[in-house]
Image: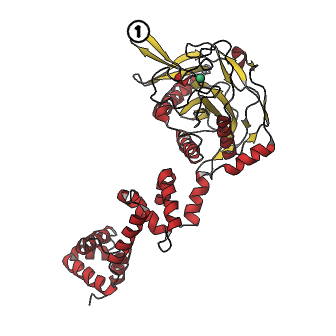
Amino acid sequence: MNYELVIGLEVHIQPNTKSKMFCSCSADIFAAKPNSHTCPTCLGLPGALPVPNKMAIEQLIKLGFAFGCNINLNSKFDRKHYYYPDLPKGYQISQYDKPFCVGGKVVLEGGKEIRITRIHMEEDTGKLSHVENKTLVDYNRSGMPLIELVTEPDFKSLQDLDIFTRELRLILRHLNISDADMEKGQLRLEANVSVRKIGEVNLPNYKVELKNINSFKFMLKAIEFEFKRQSEILESGKTPAQETRGWNENKNETFLQRTKETADDYRYFPEPDIPPILLKQSYVDSLAKCVDDLPIIKRERLKNELGLSEHEINVFINDLGLLKHFYELIKLSEIVNAKDIAKKLVNSKESQKLSAQEFFDLLKNEKSSVITNIDELKEIIKTVITENQKAYEDFKNGNENSIQFLVGQVMKKTKGKADAGVVINIIKGLNGNSLN
Ligand SMILES: [Zn+2]
């Protein structure tokens, strides 16, 4: 088909905080007894007053730094009105025209840029569960802080989306903004999807919002389905309707939830119970100084300063605990080099559990038990070749896999005490030479 996807994302992130967004209820709500983390404020009782959570706002600003956003020194909260049983106030405190962060971008692997429109703060709703013919409501999540990040429609493929989501999750974890566990709802995606003819530069005049899809896998499926559905409508000369759609897992198709609301429907107005938030530049600067390095910077350091392999870097970047442990070991080690430490940690899960002392002892023992006498090693290799003439002939005839087999045999004979790299060099050196 001659069509392409145009996708913008709205991402909801539950930041790491001690308490909820506007009250002092504990934010540690995962797996808590329903309605055990509530108070008059997050239950929306009349007369209860909201007080903004400083830590949540700081988490949002940190994310703004990560994307190079402009931080609004003059910001405010607004009321967004809609009624739903899980929203007891009948409105959500959000931000309309003065979000904390605007602009910015993220550069994906391969150089593709995704522009950030805005990052604003809002509060989460409660949670409804439908049991048989009853609906139960749990207000533990009501009033939890929620960072909303909105991107420009810069995604053209599911692959872009995948790379962006992975990178975002890493940023959130490395900067300790959020644990970003999708299973726990700490990172939720909504996609605005439209389709246009390839070569068309203008944005389509409609978009379909894919909402309330609780897994990344289903979101990708829903987008694929929409690509086909919308392309067919366009092909028939019509324009798809602007609407919100959900995903039906059983039928493997999207379905209409509602036609799209406009900002007017929400009757936004400034939240009268919270004064405008005025940030000092010096305060923002001091926050910037405390922000940890982005994963992309850490990757470069591991590569350029410590010479680690691509695989080792990926393991460390995706396992913050292990990365921290690796840095601690480097600091403690005087003679062992970082590459050896990384190699051991990445290749042996058991070694990750050892104390620093035990770990270094292990490395030392292994080093001393490796056969360092080249003549001794050559003798063993010659024996292996004599016993495996066919494999050696294959190798000489250009079959590279055969050398791995020979190395394996040498390892077997030496009980793993040979250095594979050295063995390969010796075998290659023997190639064409007389064994005597
Ligand atoms: Zn509360």
| Residue at image location 54% in from the left, 66% down from the top | 306
| Residue at image location 61% in from the left, 19% down from the top | 241
Give the SS element for disc 1: loop
* Side of 344 where 326 appears, left or right: right
Q: Nearer the viewer, residue 357 or 339?
A: 357
User: Where residue 221 sits in the image (x, y, percent)?
Assistant: 47, 31
| 187 in relation to 108, above or below | above
| Kind of residue sitting beneath label 1 | Asn
User: Where residue 79 sits in the image (x, y, percent)?
Assistant: 71, 19
| 88 in relation to 277, above or below | above
Q: Nearer the viewer, residue 213 or 184?
A: 184
Q: Quadrant of ligand 1?
A: top right
Q: Residue furthest bottom?
A: 436
| Residue at image location 25% in from the left, 75% down from the top | 414
* Side of 287 where 359 appears, left or right: left
Q: Is mark 1 within 8 Å of ligand 1?
A: no
| 423 in relation to 261, above or below | below
* Side of 334 where 63 appears, left or right: right
Q: Nearer the viewer, residue 355 or 398?
A: 355
Q: Nearer the viewer, residue 199 or 121?
A: 121
| Residue at image location 66% in from the left, 49% down from the top | 291
User: Where residue 334 sits in the image (x, y, percent)?
Assistant: 50, 73
- Give the number of marks: 1
| 435 in relation to 30, above or below | below
The residue indicated by pointer 1 is 133
* Side of 95 where 184 appears, left or right: left
User: From where the camera sits, is residue 420 visible?
Assistant: no
Query: How many C-alpha atoms fall within 10 Å of the one at disc 1: few (<14), some, or many (≥20)?
Result: few
Q: Quadrant of residue 152?
A: top right
User: Where residue 231 sits in the image (x, y, percent)?
Assistant: 55, 28
- For the C terminus, give its image quadrant: bottom left
